[in-house]
Image (cartoon, grey):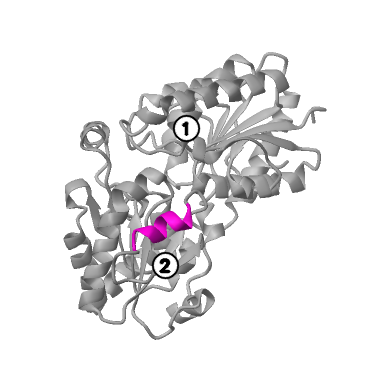
């Protein structure tokens, strides 16, 4: 192994921070002299990251919504490139956020720094033209969805499916009363979980609608208790402020999104990784999202998939409702939620579908598999002839010879 074990690692949102933090801990056990620097959040800092920037610096969703933060995002990109040029890390691990990280990968390529991309860009869903850049600038992609490896390999990308890291963070399904007790909730009360996302822009666009929807459900179901997990990228006071003038007194918890869903009879979930985490708890959910009208139009023009949520993509059908853009109203959200609460047959049908989705992801262990792939790549790079850069990662279950 090379003398320098500096590793640049970059994540840009709450889920990526959690997955990267878990990977860092696995790598530290295998590479005791590894030193991590780059960008991340609380989970990565706890795992030993020297944080040059916080993950919130680039945490924004939407093609139009990014414009107000564009100058700062470019500053961060330049600064990370400069840090990589000065330190010349042995390896870079880029986690999700493709609009940012693929630009960084291109710059790292020019510096001759090998790149591992963890959590593949969803090029199978939109902007497939990015595949050529990934093949050129990334040494290997570690995929977390079962179908991604074959898709990328068929297009010339070195890719490996390592499993879903969401399985590691989500507790095993259990009766709702178990999670209600953990969160200090009334074990006998009908419970609604509201997951507003992890970005400030999501909070601004969605939270008033989600609060109004929860109030409608509460009027139809007196005694309803509402639990809201707050991502580490958001301030709890900001979330609480949306409820101040209304009749609801929700239980706000720090993180623990999966437990909040587990405590619920139904969940309203902002589209993203959280939908899959919620699905693993086997509770009926409705997926919601809203961006600017222009971003929505551009996404519809570029998208090549029938569904938005990971749950429906893995199910191969519309298992759970997706209320997006103009359909994302308090009335529609409350209507679907009440149907879940009132119709036992529909609840059972959805839960059975969610069980199939969970089974499709296999067993936990993505962080360990990803760490083994990184260590294997480092060894192969050290053994490769001078000037050889692209190294194929094997598809066998164990990546360490």
User: How far apart are the two marked residues, 2 and 1, measured between alpha carbons?
Assistant: 36 Å
Residue 120 appears at what percent x and percent y? 47, 38
The residue lying at 61 percent from left, 50 percent from top is: 43
Q: Quadrant of residue 126?
A: top left
Q: Nearer the viewer, residue 361 or 295?
A: 295
- Of tags 2 and 1, the one toward the viewer is 2
Name the residue rendered at 35%, 28% in the picture. Answer: 67
Left or right: 271 in relation to 108: left
Count of numbered marks = 2
Task: Name the image quarter holding residue 194.
Answer: bottom left
Give the overall secondary structure of the magenta segment.
helix
Q: Is residue 91 above or below residue 388?
A: below
Q: Which residue is mark 1?
A: 153
Residue 314 at x, y = what percent? 36, 52
- Residue 337 can be seen, yes or no: yes
Q: Is residue 88 left or right of residue 341?
A: right
The magenta region covers 235-243
> Is-magenta flag for residue 96?
no
Point out the image quarter for the C terminus: top right
Helix, strand or loop for disc 1: helix
Write down the residue under mark 2. Answer: 261
């Amino acid at each position: 192994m090379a003398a320098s074990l500096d590793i640049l690692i970059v994540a840009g949102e709450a889920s990526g921070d959690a997955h990267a933090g878990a990977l860092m801990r696995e790598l530290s056990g295998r590479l005791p002299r590894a030193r991590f620097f780059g960008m991340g959040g609380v989970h990565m800092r706890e795992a030993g990251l020297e944080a040059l920037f916080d993950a919130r610096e680039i945490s924004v969703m939407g093609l139009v919504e990014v414009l107000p933060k564009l100058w700062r995002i470019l500053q961060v990109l330049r600064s990370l490139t400069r840090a990589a040029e000065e330190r010349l890390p042995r390896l870079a691990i880029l986690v999700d956020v493709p609009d940012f990280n693929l630009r960084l990968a291109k710059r790292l390529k020019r510096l001759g720094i090998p790149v591992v991309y963890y959590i593949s860009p969803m090029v199978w869903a939109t902007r497939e033209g990015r595949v050529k850049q990934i093949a050129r600038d990334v040494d290997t992609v570690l995929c977390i969805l079962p179908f991604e490896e074959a898709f990328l390999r068929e297009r010339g990308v070195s890719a490996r499916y390592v499993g879903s890291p969401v399985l590691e963070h989500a507790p095993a399904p259990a009766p709702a009363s178990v999670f209600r007790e953990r969160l200090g909730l009334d074990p006998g009360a009908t419970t609604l979980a509201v997951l507003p996302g992890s970005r400030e822009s999501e909070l601004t666009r969605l939270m008033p609608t989600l609060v109004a929807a929860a109030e409608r459900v509460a009027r139809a179901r007196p005694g309803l208790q509402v639990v809201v997990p707050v991502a580490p990228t958001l301030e709890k006071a900001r979330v609480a402020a949306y409820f101040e003038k209304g009749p609801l007194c929700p239980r706000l918890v720090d993180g623990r999104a999966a437990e909040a869903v587990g405590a619920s009879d139904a969940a309203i979930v902002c589209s993203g990784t959280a939908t899959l985490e919620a699905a693993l708890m086997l509770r009926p959910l409705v997926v919601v999202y809203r961006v600017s009208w222009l971003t929505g139009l551009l996404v519809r023009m570029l998208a090549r998939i029938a569904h938005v949520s990971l749950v429906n993509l893995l199910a191969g059908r519309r298992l759970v409702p997706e209320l997006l853009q103009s359909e994302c109203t308090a009335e529609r959200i409350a209507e679907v939620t009440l149907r879940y609460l009132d119709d036992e047959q529909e609840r059972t049908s959805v839960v059975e579908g969610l069980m199939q989705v969970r089974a499709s992801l296999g067993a936990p262990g993505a962080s360990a598999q990803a760490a083994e792939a990184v260590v294997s790549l480092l060894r192969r790079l050290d053994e490769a002839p001078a000037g050889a850069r692209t190294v194929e990662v094997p598809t066998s279950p164990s990546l360490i010879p």
